[in-house]
Amino acid sequence: MSLFSAALHPNVGLGFLILGASLHDILTRLKAEPQRFPKLDLAYSHTDPVTEPVILTLSANGIRLRFDGPEQRLRLIEVLDFSKNRITYQDKDIAKPSNVQGTSKNTKTGGDVSGGPAFKNVYHRLFGPTYAGEYIRPSDDSVDGVGTYILSYPGVAFSFPLPTSAYSPEKDVVSLLSSSASQTATSVAVFSGKSWSHAREQLWTEVLPSVKSTFLFSKSKEVVPDEISLVKIHGGGRLQLFRKWTSASMWINLGETSPQELVAELGPPDAIYRKNDQRMFIHKNRTASHSRSRSSGADFKRPDDLTDTDQSSVPTGSDDSDDEAIEDETVDNMSGECFYNYFYLGFDILISSPQQSSRMPPSQINVNEDQLLGANALKNGSPDRLVASKVVLHGNVPGSYPFNRHRRSRWEVSYLGKTEPDAIINSETPFDEIEERLREEWKSTYASEDDAKRRQRGMVLNRGWGDSPGSSCEFLGGWEDSSGGMAAKKLDDNEESTTTLYGFPGLVFEVLKNGYVSAVTIY
């Protein structure tokens, strides 16, 4: 294993580990170098994976990274073991390299050769004087009675062990840390803020600057697309995409926005997937045969009509001649259809021939079309053109089966905030609350309460079956014998391979067992 070497930049990062970078970007980079980073340990809350911090430990490299839950941005970098890396500041080692890495003699660092940065080296040679630090007393059950003294500079802090008996608020920092027992730091933290005590208060919520704005990125040849920080779902197939760190936004009108417009605004897709999986056609056929007992209109498509939104389904075929007519018709209808995969933006877009868009939410029915935000006044009626017809927003929830295939996409259902502005329904809202608000919004469109419940029953989706990790159109049970919230036992201890689909007009939610949304499809 090659030694991890990186330059420390206070307030910015450690090597390519830049504060503000997404969990998806960091993991993708680390996994691309297995010889250098052989072990990645991911820790997260199983009950609240999108609200609580996510911790990524590089145990073989002595590094720990902390990300916030909602945005999944790198907030804190910690160096815990200096024998497993080489960290420099302005081309100078902050700790004497370990003997294991080729050095032979210990110098006067005040401690073990691999124990960490020496106080004298930090305070007099590298960073210079600073204000008095913060002393954290040991816990009541501590055996040795050794606390921690945090010596803080803008964007970087050092932790020194200090016995309670040696600490006095009357002593200055040099007197406190000059003893032999306290001369070597045990860890270093890189953060954004003028001091650790100040940064700690807003560590998980501070708006970090763009990764592209750092001087480290300006030296890189990497091409990073402008981030989409939020997608507002306005109903009726209208989506507003906001760019991070700017007030700029773009609109996607399903059934109207062309592939050329998408590429002009978002850049070329990271990949293009040709849609050809028709394993759920039987459910569409069954839906048509029971149409007399249901309300008319395409607005109430069930999740089984939308499972083709999985951009990584594998092709399947049939040798049954009785199905040839259906298959031929299906192939004709899907000619030219494909997915634009934007992995680094967090979503996929289905490109197909124009389809009937979902109806307007009841709260917007009386609004004139020219007053609707983002509505396209000039509509192209050509049935042969290709347009964006569906969008899949991925949550990148830790523990879910498709974790780290896409960057986390944050969204909110804007039309649900008209009546309760303080209760925004977004990507961090548990599905129980989302379901309650949507049922209230659409209750006037159902024949009865039983009709509403029947339409919104959950269908279990298995992402762990098939010949490839992307074979996702596998279901346990049909609509007639499935019930809301039903879920099967996951196939292994590491990933949640089964989820439950719930449908509302224009929306399909893929929900994990913990109640959070893994993905939402807008059509």
Image (spheres, rainbow, N blue to C red):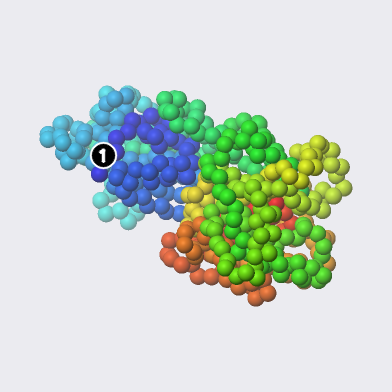
In the image, farthest residue toward the front: 321
Q: Residue 87: percent from the left, percent from the top?
A: 29, 33
Q: Residue at x 50, y 55 (%)?
A: 402
Residue 478 figure quarter = bottom right
Q: Residue at x 66, y 31 (%)?
A: 248
Q: Residue 40: percent from the left, percent from the top?
A: 36, 50
Q: Residue at x 62, y 46 (%)?
A: 349
Q: Which residue is mark 1?
A: 3
What count of labels does the image hold?
Answer: 1
Q: Residues within 10 Å of mark 1 (few under 14, many from 20)?
A: some
Q: Is residue 126 left or right of residue 493?
A: left
Q: Residue 113: percent from the left, percent from the top?
A: 18, 37
Q: Residue at x 43, y 66 (%)?
A: 492
Amino acid type of disc 1?
Leu
Q: Is residue 44 left or right of residue 71?
A: left
Foreground residue among 177 and 208: 208
> Which quadrant of the rendered structure holds the N terminus?
top left
Q: Residue 126: percent from the left, percent from the top?
A: 30, 25
Residue 172 seen: no
